Image (tube, grey):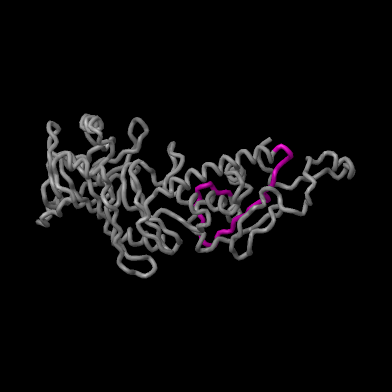
Amino acid sequence: MRGTACSTRFAEASVDASSRLARQPFRSGRDRTQQSKYSNVSTLRTKHGAAGPTDAVRHLSIGEDDAGQRLDNFLGRLCRGVPKSHLYRLIRSGQLRVNGRRQAADYRLQAGDSVRVPPIRPADAAAPDAVAIEAGADERVRRTRAGLARRLPVLHEDEALLVVDKPASVAVHGGSGISSGVIEQLRAARPQARFLELVHRLDRETSGVLLLARRRAALVALHAQWRERAADKRYLAIVAGRWPLRTRVLAFPLHRHQAPDGDRRVSVRAGGQEALTRVTGLLRFELPPLGEFSLVEARLETGRTHQIRVHLAHAGCPIVGDARYGRFELNREMTRRGFRRMYLHAQSIRFRHPDTGRPMLIEAPAPEEFALLLRAGGAVWPAPRGSGGEEEGA
């Protein structure tokens, strides 16, 4: 039998002591005062002190350092070595509660929340073997994710921030058929990290600068800069078509909707969300017989889903390799020639450090795929800046 029994078993009062002993599951000859298999619970600093034996219900108060975490991630760090299926069963069954109520696994903990953690121990004699197999599988997954995280180039790290250069084709988080992304991989590689959360997101196909907060206060401070549009985010893109060597301001309102195939899409629509992108042409080149292409820099004033991709496509210059908003026939020919990615790269972010207020500029070098495509068209790399002429409105 698999699973954990988190509630205390009560014997009927009418059964004598000998029959009770006979009906109890077999246990090893160890001292029953020792902690059970699932008692390898890491120390958690709360108002109630360190984690105690798993035979007792614990009530943990969430502090500022733990606020913002998902409930399942918090429980996973608290109960290291316990298979995730057992922890999710505690959440789904309502045995683990927040402020006396059931909460979903993706609930974000708040400072001051009270988390009830029930006893966690094997249910019967068959459980340890099955649990050991499952725990081993979880450990293999963790090691695989940690190995992937070690391949992520670190652009900057301090007590408040971690900045990595995300490769193209790697999601920032798991979900929708993706087992893990950057955040899960980094958490696996840094199991002692009390807090690690994404500050912003990049599309799976986009490479470049990705910020993560190592403290709750840093996350809140950076989100405030994002809301106030104080952060300067710039992207490089290679687009199909002839983009002017000056700056155009694209101010097309964007509307999110679901396509007939169930996929999430964004389109330009009157009454949609405000969206503003400044796009500067850097250079142009030609790939006979496919036509003309342009290297551009896109500066985000707002941060809508797929904003740069939709704005450029609507302006008549879709990003090369964009399977969702680009030109299908062109993308197929580019793939045949060996250019297999979407050519969008988060080149830099300028912001103020959340602790010191010091101006920060984090840059990620353009991937080699960009240089290869430019060289194929006879273009000079690195590309010179635009002429800095007048901005042209959309």
Name the residue at 29% across, 53% down. Answer: 364
Is 176 colored magenta in this rendering? Answer: no
- Residue 331 or residue 390, whichever sits in front: 331
Name the residue at 36% across, 61% down. Answer: 222
Q: Position of residue 221 (x, y in %)?
A: 38, 63
Q: Position of residue 231 (x, y in %)?
A: 29, 60
Q: Position of residue 161 (x, y in %)?
A: 40, 60
Whether residue 126 is visible: yes
Q: Is residue 156 above or below residue 174?
A: below
Q: Main secondary structure of the magenta part?
A: loop
- Residue 364 or residue 294, whichever sits in front: 364
In which quadrant of the rendered image does the N terminus lie? top right
Is residue 112 rendered to the left or right of residue 350? Answer: right
- Residue 249 or residue 331, whichever sits in front: 331
Q: How many marks?
A: 0
Bounds of the magenta span?
102-126
Is 104 colored magenta in this rendering? Answer: yes
- Residue 365 or residue 109, whichever sits in front: 365
